[in-house]
Amino acid sequence: MMLRLQSMTRWRNVMLAVLLCAAAPCSAIDHVNEYDVALREEVVRIPLPSEARRPALIATTYRPQGNGPFPLIVLNHGSPASVAEREKMGRYRVLDRVQEFVIRGYAVVVPMRRGYGSTGGAWAENFGRCAAPDYYAAGEQAAMDVVNAMTHVARLPWVDRQQIVLAGQSAGGFAAIAAASKQPAGVVAVVNFSGGRGGRPDSHPGEPCDAENMKRAISRYAQTIRVPVLWHYAENDRYFSPDHVRDWFRAFEAAGATGTLVMQPPFGSDGHNLFASPAGRPIWTAAFDMFMLRNGYSLPMRANKNQ
């Protein structure tokens, strides 16, 4: 099935982006910024196992018009540095990014992991001191939340539980990789936007705390990942430099996982913000579309025959 947009102009824009990405790293093109699409937003509580020491996560679901079943995007947020910033995250209602997935025919769930926003509670993903971070342990906690959220929402009648994509930005990209290592049923791909932990953009631009430790954690997770993973970064990422990203990606592939690394040219003042910036939308959406098509997943229709 191909993507059914509301006009042929929008369809041409999507396909132009795909063709541009086939030849080189994606670059900004003319892009329709606002779609006439209902997001059908709903807040849900997701029970957690007793070892999580938190009864539930707060998550938000979005879906296209129609009855489905729709393929599902599990969209995972990043991690602000301070407690106060994490508390202010609310439900991480990034409607511009959610909209891009919904217009492509996906349902979306955005879970707030433990210690963030509406879920609150103790921060489960604390990786310790910069001199000796435990990224693997932090990833394990994030993976618990992501997998529980995915499993709960996959049971809803409007979700195609065999077509699930784990996605996330920054710490959320790392969380998506960690969750994929658990091989949850129904996951077909992972999308990692500028993923990692331990970035120090102000004091040490491009140099995260103990990059070798991050490489070891990624290598360990990669040993049990069985689906393709898109790694999408920009050359001027102030959290994770291209040299570190390429080193991590080589370790990822050496451990047996399959991935595609797209390293974009410099974007704005900090390429780490590409996914969050309105100007970045035509760039990351083009990379996403091409990645899915290249791995045999046609863009889903925006609504099913029961609409």
Image (cartoon, grey):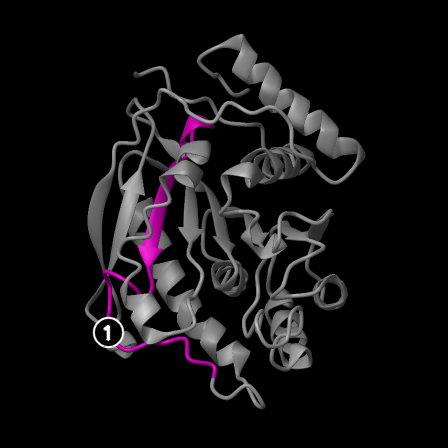
Q: Which residue is mark 1?
A: 121
Apparent side of residue 187 relative to residue 217 in the rendered image (left or right): left
Neighbours of disc 1 within 10 Å: few (<14), some (14-19), many (20+) = some
Residue 35: image x %, image y %?
A: 40, 22
Tell whether 224 sits left or right of 89: right
Q: Secondary structure at mark 1?
A: loop
User: Is any atom of residue 231 visible in this view?
Assistant: yes
| Quadrant the C terminus occupies | top left
49 in relation to 150, above or below: below
Horizontal and vertical percent for residue 161?
A: 39, 42
Asked whether the viewer can see residue 115, the reply is no
The residue range painted magenta reads 102-127
Residue at figure coordinates x 60%, y 51% from the top left: 227
**Magenta includes 222?**
no
Does residue 186 appear to the left or right of 8 in the view shown? left
Tell me which residue sits at (42%, 22%) in the image. 302
Rendering quarter of residue 28: top right
Observer-nearest of 185 and 22: 22
Where is residue 249? Give x, y as percent.
Answer: 72, 62
For residue 174, above or below residue 162: below
- Asked if 233 appears above or below 87 in the picture, the reply is above
Q: Quadrant of residue 224?
A: bottom right
* Rendering coords of residue 25 (x, y %): 74, 40
Q: How many marks?
A: 1
Main SS category, magenta section: loop
> Which residue in the rendered view is the most extreme toward the right?
23
Name the amino acid type tagged 1.
Gly
Q: Is residue 124 magenta?
A: yes
Q: Nearer the viewer, residue 263 or 54?
A: 263
In the displayed orientation, state which residue is furthest to the top: 8
